[in-house]
Amino acid sequence: MPSAPAVGQNQTGNKARDESKDSPSNWWLIIPTIVIAVATGIQVWIYCQQATYMWRGLHISIRQNRIANKTAIAAKKSTEAAITQFEVTQRPWCKIGLSACQGITFRDDTMFFDFVVEIENVGLSPATSYHYECAIKLQHEGGPTLTELRKGLTETAIKRAGHEFVLFPKDPRRGGFTETRNITGAPDLIAVNVVVVVAYRSTFSNSPKATSTIFYVHHRVNGTFKKGQDVAWADIRIDADPMYATVAN
């Protein structure tokens, strides 16, 4: 006769069977978790692709901006070059001339100069605010060199250039230039340099411009003036000093 099962064992088995019947499989938790993980992975992949495309777009945009900047700089330089070329061909250019009026005379130890300065605009547009300065330097004198003298006259002419005078092309203007110089202790033969500077402005630009010429004034016979001897204007030759060619800007 078989023995009856123990009460405790029966209860444990019944409880396990009841739990297995009442609790469905855990797949209803596993499957959504897998789906969420897959969706998350897909979303991460999509974000990575979007980031890649955005990075490529940003790189292309930066490169296009660089190209645009280079193009703008090149266009600006080209425009400036065209404006400069136009100004060079159309701007005023002043030419300086010097001629004798009463010549050079000596009275005791004083030397008298009397010249005519001619300024002509050989450019294609009016020169505004023009002003000229003149100075004489005897070669035996000390003091500033011809280059220094020309520089000082240029600065003075630019400062004194007014706004009321206009020099039109092919309309030369003339002005007198007289000066006296004490020649006590000078050598018997005197050489003379005349420095003339004209400052003016252009209708294309308000920045001042200047032209300067150094003339070598001498007797046409012996190349210099002899102290105590008057020199008539017909005996005076005026040349632009080859050592100091006309300077213009």
Image (cartoon, helix red, strand yellow):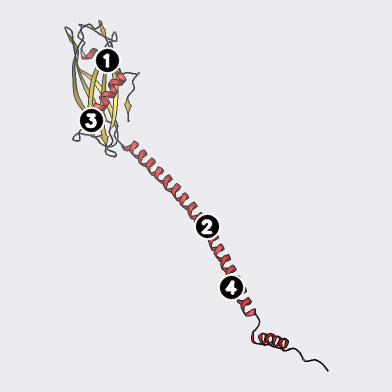
Whether label 2 touches label 3, CB < 8 Å: no
Q: Quadrant of the N terminus?
A: bottom right
Q: Quadrant of the C terminus?
A: top left
Q: Which tag is nearer the camera, tag 2 or tag 3?
A: 2
Earlier sequence position, callout 4 versus callout 2: 4
Q: Nearer the viewer, residue 90 or 111?
A: 111
Earlier sequence position, callout 4 versus callout 1: 4
Q: Nearer the viewer, residue 195 or 8?
A: 8
User: Amino acid type of disc 4?
Assistant: Ile
- Asked whether, in this view, residue 27 is left or right of residue 49, the answer is right
Q: Secondary structure at mark 2?
A: helix
Whether label 4 touches label 2, CB < 8 Å: no
Q: Residue extending furthest right?
A: 1
Question: Which residue is under mark 2?
Answer: 55
Q: Which tag is nearer the camera, tag 4 or tag 3?
A: 4
Mark 4–mark 3 Cα distance, whole angstroms, equals: 85 Å
Label 1: how many Cα within 10 Å (few below 14, some 14–19, many 20+): few
Q: Kindly indicate the quadrant of the structure image that contains residue 112.
A: top left
Question: Which residue is under mark 1?
Answer: 143
Label 2: how many Cα within 10 Å (few below 14, some 14–19, many 20+): few
Q: Which tag is nearer the camera, tag 1 or tag 2?
A: 2
Vertical relation: 1 (above or below) 110: below
Label 3: how many Cα within 10 Å (few below 14, some 14–19, many 20+): few
Q: Secondary structure at mark 3?
A: helix
Earlier sequence position, callout 2 versus callout 3: 2
Earlier sequence position, callout 4 versus callout 3: 4
